[in-house]
Image (cartoon, rainbow, N blue to C red):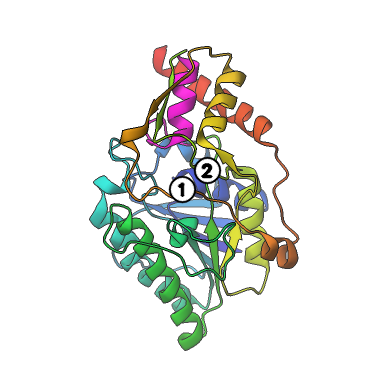
Amino acid sequence: MRILITGAAGFLGSHLTDRFLSEGHQVIGLDNFITGNRANLAHLSDNLNFTLMEQDVSTYISVSESLDFVLHFASPASPSKTSPLGYPNLPIQTMKAGALGTHNTLGLAKKHGAKFLLASTSEVYGDPLIHPQPETYWGNCDPVGVRSVYDEAKRFAEALTMAYHNFHGVDTRIVRIFNTFGPRMRLDDGRSVPNFIQQALRKEPLTIYGTGEQTRSFCYVDDLVEGICRLMDSIEHLPVNIGNPLEVSINEFARLINEICENSAGLIINASERLGDDPERRQPDITKAKSILGWEPVVGIRDALSRTIDYFRSKLEQLQA
């Protein structure tokens, strides 16, 4: 196949690009590098099956070659207010990627008769009132809150994707991605995994925003990529949760990172500095993914963290060299 993927230089986009190329497909990667990292694609500079388009997804996209699949992964995704990569600091770009970017990529898929996959998010559930969250749950979101530029952009993108499917007959997929981590996350991303690992490797105490009792379900990137590929091969048009149902508190997660890094500095709890609209609990119901995709995560959290820590250690060593 010839596959176009937006956000190709991002954490998830670059891993998917590698997966598609390893299977013999041709890939056109599109990225404007606002949050994408050129280093994630550097190893593909001589790959004849890879083409890079440096472009903002919110502007008109023209591709002369035929396309079999379009995947829309371009968007800031970090809720950090302190990182320049966080969507609170890129609010208009985030909304445009979700709205105009989805419109442009759906139009591209329609023009080429290609299949389409939208990267949505567990954030469409907001701060959920039911637990775990199935795809049938409509969510509990603040449309004007501090996280709304991301949450509402993705909710709009899902609605537009279904409109193109129902009205234009575009063959679409929607994946709701839960917290995912692994190699190629940016050091300055601002999310908990890069922050915790860097502090632990530097033998510093890990900074917790909020009480740390809020929960997340962390999925390793290889498992996520496998789930997305299975969704691409399916005929399911409605949203599908892809994530790890293992629920852990932020405190537990941070202590595990300290243990693996042999960091005895402990934790610093900043209960008064929790991010606004931060969900209290997050856990996917993956019954649907198990049933229709035969998918569930296979990489254990300790193994996944060890691989990720090795990556961050090498990156920090490069910076110090």
The residue range painted magenta reads: 185-202
Decide: few, some or many residues near mark 1? Use Cα within 10 Å; few <14, some 14-19, many ≥20: some
Which label belongs to residue 182? Answer: none
Residue pictured at 54% horizontal, 51% vertical: 178
Q: Which residue is mark 1?
A: 280
Residue 201 falls within the magenta-colored stretch: yes
Task: Say which of 144 and 193 sits in front.
Answer: 144
Identify which amino acid the numbered label 2 is placed on: Thr
Residue pictured at 52% horizontal, 20% vertical: 313
Residue 64 in the figure: left or right of residue 33: right
User: Is residue 253 at all visible to an observer of this figure?
Assistant: yes
Identify which amino acid the numbered label 1 is placed on: Glu
Q: Which residue is mark 2?
A: 215
Image vertical order of residue 233 relative to residue 309, above or below: below
Residue pictured at 58% horizontal, 75% vertical: 237
Residue 123 in the figure: left or right of residue 81: right
Task: From the top left corner, tell me how far across and down residue 177 is, in percent.
Answer: 53, 55
Task: From the top left corner, tell me how far across and down residue 284 is, in percent.
Answer: 59, 55
Image vertical order of residue 243 relative to residue 65, above or below: above
Residue pictured at 33% horizontal, 42% vertical: 275
Per the image, label 2 sits on a secondary structure element best described as: strand
Distance from label 1 to label 2 (Cα)? Answer: 6 Å
Task: From the top left corner, tell me how far across and down residue 183 is, in percent.
Answer: 54, 34
Image vertical order of residue 320 relative to residue 195, above or below: above
Find out whether the residues at labels 1 and 2 contact each other: C-beta distance under 8 Å: yes
Tell me the quarter of the picture where residue 24 sits.
bottom right
Decide: few, some or many residues near mark 2? Use Cα within 10 Å; few <14, some 14-19, many ≥20: some
Task: Say which of 210 and 53 sits in front.
Answer: 210
